[in-house]
Image (tube, helix red, strand yellow):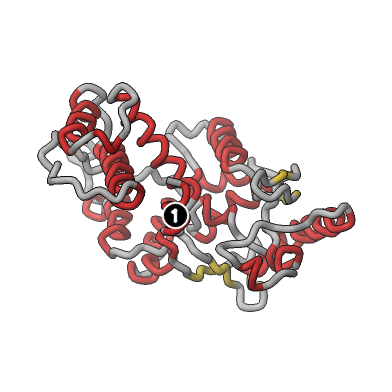
Amino acid sequence: MHDACRRKSMAASTEKIYWGWIKRYIRFHDLAHPEDLDAEAIREFLNFMASDRSVAASTQNQALNALVFLYKHVLGLDLEDFSAFVRARKPKRLPVVLTPNEARCLLNLMEGVSGIIARLLYGTGLRLGEALKLRVKDLDFEYGLVHVCAGKGEKDRKTMMPDQLSPLLKHHLKHVKRMHEQDLDDGAGQAPLPYAFDRKSSHAATEWGWQWVFPSARLTVVPETGQITRFHISPSTVQKAVKAASQQCGITKRVTCHTLRHSFATHLIEGGYDIRTVQELLGHKDLRTTMIYTHVLGRGLHVRSPLDR
């Protein structure tokens, strides 16, 4: 499974989620090996999720994708059609969006590295994973751009760097550089590199440009190589900080890090920017995905209520 995920350049988080569904599938069938299970076994599992567990449609689709990946790319088996399963209902949901005042209150209460990342999410529309995986070389202060390398779907894109964020990031990078120089003095300081780039450039791992913008406070030993490295900070660190700040603000909406991305898109459209520009900044493949933010604004709802008359 791990080898198949690496061949497909799958994100580590996706691999973890797929592996979780495969383990649930195996346990559901009393630890039977997937090679001994057929299409009917997959149908039973998916029906159980929809009927007995009442999971969301997206959750059921995630499990389905994991099982298709298992049989097609890991086991190399071509199963007969198993599409006749109970589909979980897929309600149309609108994303949660903060008002400008709520966003201002939340960001004002956030400090330190988590505060910088939260401002980055709201100011650029990055996903949390994309922000945490930024390298020093991805920040272009001269042109005021942030380069997103291998974002969702392995796609690259560029977005703006907010003027207000530029001095904060420069100050933050001074601290990160001192940490990196200390790591080098201690015999560490090698950042994990994508694909096989460490074989193409033997010195790249220790170069300043390849270091994480938001490194972890702790050094880690890579089990496979024994190399001492420093990964980026944990997503949960930022998630907890955002939740705590939203509670302090008295915001009753369910606020997550992704809410800041939704708010970025909605506030741009509200500010008069065209939908195509917002699509490019968000990295959406389909314009219809971006169009949902026009519904969030409720363009057709600005009428006078009869109660007010």
Which residue is drawn at the image coordinates 64% and 62% (left, top)? 135
Residue 116 percent coordinates (x, y): 65, 52
Residue sitting farthest toward the front: 36
Where in the figure is residue 129, as x and y percent of width and height? 52, 51
Seen at 58% across and 56% down, the residue is 133
Residue farthest along the bottom direction in this orientation: 143
Q: Quadrant of residue 136?
A: bottom right
Q: Nearer the viewer, residue 2 or 209?
A: 2
Residue 261 visible in the snapshot: no
Q: Residue at x 40, y 69 (%)?
A: 280
Instruction: Give the residue number, with chain letter if any, for mark 1.
Output: 10
Relative side of 16 to 107, left or right: left
Q: Residue 176: percent from the left, percent from the top?
A: 77, 56
Q: Few, some or many C-alpha atoms within 10 Å of disc 1 (few <14, some 14-19, many ≥20)?
A: some
Q: Of residues 253 and 128, which is closer to you in this image?
A: 128
Q: Position of residue 175 (x, y in %)?
A: 80, 55
